[in-house]
Image: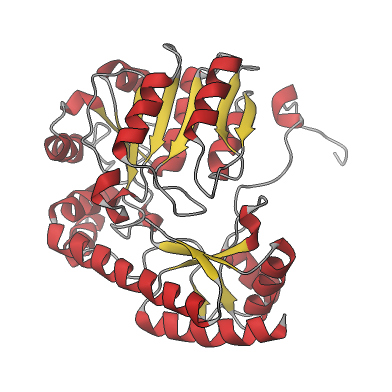
Amino acid sequence: MTDVKLPFTARVAGLPSTIPFVGPEALERRRGVPFDVRVGANESAFGMSPKAASAMRDAIERIAWYGDPEGYDLRAAIAQLHDVNVDEVCLAGGVDELLGLTVRMLVEPGQAVITSLGAYPTFNYHVTGFGGELVRVPYKDDHIDLQALVDAAHQHAAPLVYLANPDNPMGTWHDAGAVQDFINALPERTVVVVDEAYIEFAPESAQWPITTTDPRVLRMRTFSKAHGMAGARIGYVAAHAEAIVGYSKIRNHFGVSRPALAGALASLQDTAFLQHVIDEVARGREDYYELARQYNLAYVQSATNFVAIDVGGGERARALLAELESRNVFIRMPGVAPMDRCVRVSVGLPADRAVFAERFADALKAI
């Protein structure tokens, strides 16, 4: 049976065989050499709470059991943190899974979905996979253009708009008042995903209480970044109870593992460790700002655990990435002009930052 072809749907057959990100592991396999410094995937260099690690080790003793399909204890703790009802919280395998569920829940094939040109590509991956039609509006001065998103939503009668605040890949943010004005200006039947994966690192002006009174607003958060649990795959959405009912109709009810549930609950309660990570990330950002100034390079003020450094154009940025890879340093860059004039480097441990600074200088000389 040499020429057998699976009966893919027309939608799947027409999709490119690509994934949103090429992982550092894939690059290492291709190169045959591991990276010395891994500061490209916006992972936490500071690990997770020791209390979370202990809780996960204990949970492994019962790994033969399924996790609670309702994730009740963790949802109750999240609800208490945000002063919402437990029925207004849904868990999933990170924000990435929640984005896919959201598109599946709200977007019919052929409908327009609004995002920013160059924003988080996994959202685009899900929209395309479920048959939506992406409408991408350009950034404005390295920020997501809120008015352009509103205008596109009205023009296309879009059921869904995506906003990351703070933003990946530039690290910029909008203050809470501007985000609320943006939501108020959307069409009455347009739902907005507010992806707050990096919110713990943002200034106070960007942080606003989670409320669930507006059924059009889906607030998504993760344990991958500040909590240092990216490999555990767990995140949540807080929203109106009607939205949570929709998620429950289609989500994988056993999709979050028992150790992930235990670790996330312990991490949520370890506020001292979380503050330690936030403080260390702030120090690391300042190191990168100083590094950029040392070489007369511009940088983008960041509210995340990474910094975008302007190296003067897309070709230079790609050349710099290649030079750093040849020096066993993994970073990334935005994929769309004009942001692709920058390289993006995650905050590593002080030792990682020192190695990066040395090899960054060598790479700059080489290009």
Asked whether the viewer can see residue 63, the reply is no
Is residue 60 shown left or right of residue 5? left
The residue depicted at 21 percent of the width and 50 percent of the height is 262
Quadrant of the image occupied by residue 342: bottom right
Task: Indicate the position of residue 33 as horizontal and vertical percent values.
Answer: 63, 80
Looking at this view, is 295 or 129 the one in front? 295
Against 34, residue 125 (above or below) is: above
Is residue 67 shown left or right of residue 14? left
Task: Indicate the position of residue 281 as horizontal and vertical percent values.
Answer: 32, 67
Asked whether the viewer can see residue 230, the reply is yes
Q: How is the image coloured?
A: secondary structure
Against 215, residue 22 (above or below) is: below
The residue depicted at 72 percent of the width and 43 percent of the height is 17
The residue depicted at 46 percent of the width and 20 percent of the height is 105
The residue depicted at 70 percent of the width and 61 percent of the height is 314
Quadrant of the drawing holding the N terminus? top right
Quadrant of the drawing holding the C terminus? bottom right
Is residue 337 shown left or right of residue 163? right
Looking at this view, is 262 or 280 the one in front? 280
Is residue 51 shown left or right of residue 7? left
Q: Residue furthest right?
A: 3
Task: Indicate the position of residue 285 as horizontal and vertical percent values.
Answer: 38, 69
Against 329, residue 90 (above or below) is: above
Looking at this view, is 274 or 27 the one in front? 274
Task: Indicate the position of residue 221 as horizontal and vertical percent values.
Answer: 33, 42
Quadrant of the image occupied by residue 31: bottom right
